Amino acid sequence: MLKPFRYILLFCIVLFSGFSAVAQVAMPDNVCIGAVKHYNVDPNLVSGSTYTWRIDGITQISSTINEIDIIWNTAGTYLLEVQELSVDGCIGPLISGQVFVSAALTIIANSNSPVCAGSSINLTAQAVPEGTYLWTGTNGYSSSDQNSVIFSASDAVAGIYSLVVSTNGCTSAPSSVTIIVNDCDVVDFNIPEGFSPNGDGINDLFVIRGIENYPDNKFVIFNRWVIKCSKQVLTKTLGMANVQLD
């Protein structure tokens, strides 16, 4: 009676000797909420086995074969287990691994735009533990820095820059910033259409905004009959009190 029992026991040991851990992804596994992951174990050389998959002890009815697809919808740490039952009724070893499910990753890209031509463009983002950064933008721009700097801004580098960050199996949705490069050497210059020097404190002075940037100017006044009344160099403001009409 002892000899058949030994035969069955040895048969079961040989049967499960090739049973291995999850093969497709390394365990522990890191995933993001909403991810669908595929897990599998090496199949038995003898067909007909069934497999029981469990998450934190709860049997997953979606699969009884050696592989399973799981949708991870809630953040947390989970224990994934699988156990084989051979066609001859032999129970295989319990194989398990942890799965860490992370919340969705939200990233906000920032910059110092608008900037003046020739200055630096600063692309910035918040720190993400163990995060991998990827900035992409105009003219094939690419950077893996969290905070990236583009030197000597010009019209050629203006445009939209996008950032994605990955960590623990999660990749953020892209976040974008628009970079505007201005020519700050352009002077703000304006000549008013008229003024009213009547002493009421409203538009009493004739002010040409930005005239101080043109020290070699010639300011000429004509009357309504296009007769020249005055000619002089204007510095900044001109009121009737300091104008000598010819």
Image: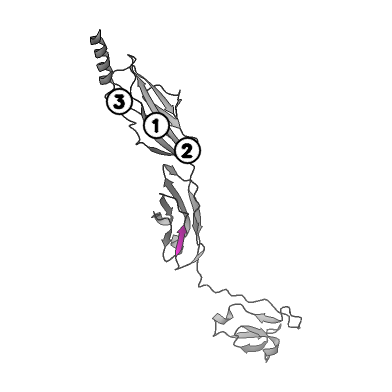
How far apart are labels 1 and 3 at the CA level? Answer: 18 Å
Q: Which residue is mark 2?
A: 76
Please, what is the three-letter code of the amino acid marked with disc 3? Answer: Phe
Please, what is the three-letter code of the amino acid marked with disc 2? Answer: Gly
Residue 21, image x, y percentages? 32, 30
Position of residue 43 in the picture relative to residue 157 (left or right): left
Instruction: Evaluate whether residue 35 shows in this view.
Output: no
Q: Which residue is mark 1?
A: 38
**What secondary structure is the stretch in magenta mostly built from?**
loop
- Label 3 environment density (alpha carbons within 10 Å; few <14, some 14–19, many ≥20): some
Residue 194, image x, y percentages? 69, 78
Q: Residue at x 45, y 53 (%)?
A: 127
Q: Which residues are magenta?
A: 118-127
Q: Quadrant of the C terminus?
A: bottom right
Q: Is residue 124 magenta?
A: yes
Q: Earlier in the sequence, mark 2 or mark 1?
A: 1
User: Toward the viewer: 246 or 42?
Assistant: 42
- Label 1 environment density (alpha carbons within 10 Å; few <14, some 14–19, many ≥20): some
Q: Which residue is mark 3?
A: 19
Residue 166, image x, y percentages? 42, 46
User: Toward the viewer: 75 or 218?
Assistant: 75
Position of residue 49 in the picture relative to residue 111 (left or right): left
How far apart are labels 2 and 1 at the CA level? Answer: 18 Å
Q: How is the image coloured?
A: one colour
- Label 2 environment density (alpha carbons within 10 Å; few <14, some 14–19, many ≥20): few
Callout 3: helix, strand or loop?
loop
Q: Residue furthest left?
A: 3
Position of residue 151 relative to residue 64, above or below, is below
Residue 73, image x, y percentages? 49, 35
